Image: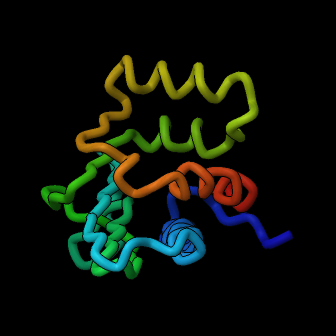
Amino acid sequence: MDAKIRQGTAAWFDMVGQTMCEAALRAELAPDLNLTLIERYTDGIELADGLIQGLRFDIIDGRPSFRSGARRDEQGDIIIQITAAAARELNLLHNADPQYPKSLERVLRTGEMQVNGDPSLMGSWLNAVHEPIVDRTK
């Protein structure tokens, strides 16, 4: 098993981005797919160069890439804004854990997590990345 990485660190966002890229490549994306997903912590600390805790994930012409860190005003097709505490809560729970859907519903209802755009546009592979991310998170 790979070493666990502290959630919210630059190394952790690198791991998340790499995991997403690997999953997207295995999914054999359509060559004309172009989407951008931005995830940022609403209370995120600065990482470097004006970027806060978060991730920019691009699919350009069916090829995935990412950048650790997000700009506070950065836009994309899908934007997920979440508090660091809510992200931590969700990133420690596997999909099969009965608490996971309850926690997800609660953070959406309270506004601790806001989703603009349709994450399903990325494809079903996106849901599959949650498990390996949880496995690598401490």
Residue 108 versus residue 54 in the image, above or below? above
Query: Residue 117 location, x and y as percent?
Result: 24, 44
Q: How many marks?
A: 0
15 or 53: nearer the viewer: 15
Q: Residue at x 68, y 57 (%)?
A: 137
Q: Quadrant of residue 16?
A: bottom right
Position of the C terminus by quadrant: bottom right
User: Looking at the picture, how far across and down is residue 11, in whole percent?
Assistant: 55, 74
Which residue sits at x=28%, y=75%?
32
Out of 9 and 29, give the one closest to the viewer.
29
Q: Residue at x 38, y 72 (%)?
A: 30
Q: Is residue 122 left or right of residue 26?
A: left
Residue at x 26%, y 70% (from the top left corner): 34
Coloration of the structure image: rainbow
| Residue 124 position in % (x across, y down) | 52, 52
Question: In the image, is 121 to the left or to the right of 123?
Answer: left
Which quadrant of the figure contains the N terminus? bottom right
Residue 101 image offset from top left, x and y in percent: 59, 25
